[in-house]
Structures are given as structure tokens and as C-alpha cells.
């Protein structure tokens, strides 16, 4: 800011009023900045060394972002990877459901099931309690020669085990 001609790098000078006040405020802030003659470089502040590594990023992601579980992940080599991931996320209750979104503090219009509008939109309900899920199981189970007992329409199947903050 103290250099002569520095302001010529702008298309125009401040026109007074608010612009002039903001310009003076910027000049005051930058007046305390001391620039070194060293070359610019990136610095990774997540580790003490300051050097970026992929392994350090992976360890931060593992530590702070991935869910923790005491059970080991079981993958089926016969199933497609997408199905393995779906089953894994279902087992740890990390699917995007209205209840999970609500529990994370996201504003959702309703926590009811978007299909039947009767049960709470939890992982359990979507896969095992919703009338659509039950009808789908009845239709698909013969393909795999499975005998899945159906529950009568008069019985309401629902659990609140997946709803942690609703009460």
C-alpha cells in the first residue's frame, strides 16, 4: 500500500463515501502486513510437519468422518459392490432417511414414510415395515426360493429403535 503506483493496478480509484472508507480500512489493515522475500508455498496445517501427504488425509477422514463400529465389515464376493455398500450402510443405520436427516439437525418437512405416510421413515420401516417393502418382498422372494412370512394387514409393524432424538 505504501508503494507508489500500487493503486494503478485497479480499474478505477475509490469514488469517495463508502468506497473511500473501505479503501482506508483496507489500507490500515494491510499496513501491519510484513511481506517476506521468500517464495510462496503451500502449507498443510493438519500435521506438525506442514507437509501434505495422502496418508495424513486418509487418517483424518478415518478419525473424524467415518462411522465407528466394533463389528467387522463383511463383504460378499458374489454380490455387486453397490449391494455390499447398501447392506453395510443399512447395518450401521447410515442411509439417507427422513429420520436420519432429522437426527442430524436437517430440517425435513415430515419424518413419516414418503410411500405409505403411516410409519416413521426409519431404515427399519423403509426396508421391512412399509407396505411397499412388504409387497416387494412377497413378489421377489420366490425368485430366490425364500419363504418369507407375511404379516396381516391389520398388524402395524414399526419400531422406534432408529429414532434417537424424537422423544
Image (cartoon, grey):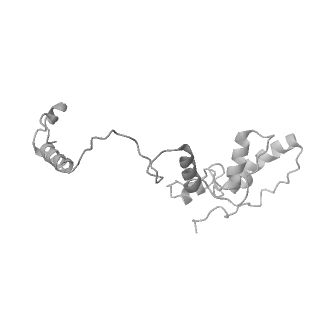
| 105 shown above or below 28 | below
Is residue 111 something that shows in the picture? Answer: no
**Which quadrant of the rendered structure holds the N terminus?**
top left
At 54% across and 58% down in the image, what residue appears?
104
In the figure, is residue 141 to the left or right of 35? Answer: right
Note whether 112 is above or below 40 in the view shown. below
Give whichever of 111, 104 is nearer the camera: 104
In the foreground, 3 or 111: 3
> Residue 19 lies in what quarter of the image?
top left
| Residue shown at the point (19%, 47%) measured from the top left | 26
Q: Residue furthest bottom?
A: 167
Residue 36 image offset from top left, x and y in percent:
27, 44
Who's the residue at 12% across and 36% down the image?
4
Instruction: Specify the farthest residue to the left.
Output: 16
Residue 43 as seen in the image, left or right of residue 105: left
Work out which quarter of the rendered image holds the C terminus and state it.
Answer: bottom right
Nearest the eye: 64 or 115: 64
To which quarter of the image does residue 68 belong? bottom right
x and y percentages locating residue 160 in the rendered image: 66, 64
**Along the horizontal axis of the image, is 98 left or right of 157?**
left
Horizontal and vertical percent position of residue 43 = 41, 46
Q: Is residue 79 at all visible to an observer of this figure?
A: yes
Q: Is residue 156 above or below residue 90?
A: below
Q: Position of residue 152 (x, y in %)?
A: 81, 57
Task: Give the total number of marks visible in the rendering.
Answer: 0
As drawn, is 72 to the left or to the right of 35? Answer: right
Amino acid at each position: 500500500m505504501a508503494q507508489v503506483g500500487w493503486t494503478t493496478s485497479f480499474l478505477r480509484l475509490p469514488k469517495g463515501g463508502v468506497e473511500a472508507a473501505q479503501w482506508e480500512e483496507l489500507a490500515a489493515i494491510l499496513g501491519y502486513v510484513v511481506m517476506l522475500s521468500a517464495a510462496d508455498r503451500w502449507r498443510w496445517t493438519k500435521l506438525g510437519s506442514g507437509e501434505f501427504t495422502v496418508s495424513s488425509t486418509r487418517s483424518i477422514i478415518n478419525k473424524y468422518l467415518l462411522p465407528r463400529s466394533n463389528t467387522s465389515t463383511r463383504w460378499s464376493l458374489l454380490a455387486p459392490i453397490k449391494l455390499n455398500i447398501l447392506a453395510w450402510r443399512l447395518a450401521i443405520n447410515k442411509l439417507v432417511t427422513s429420520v436420519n436427516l432429522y437426527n442430524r439437525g436437517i430440517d425435513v418437512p415430515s419424518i413419516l414414510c414418503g410411500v405409505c405416510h403411516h410409519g416413521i421413515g426409519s431404515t427399519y420401516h423403509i426396508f421391512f415395515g412399509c407396505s411397499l417393502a412388504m409387497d416387494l418382498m412377497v413378489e421377489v422372494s420366490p425368485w430366490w426360493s425364500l419363504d418369507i412370512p407375511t404379516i396381516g394387514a391389520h398388524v402395524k409393524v414399526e419400531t422406534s429403535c432408529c429414532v434417537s432424538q424424537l422423544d
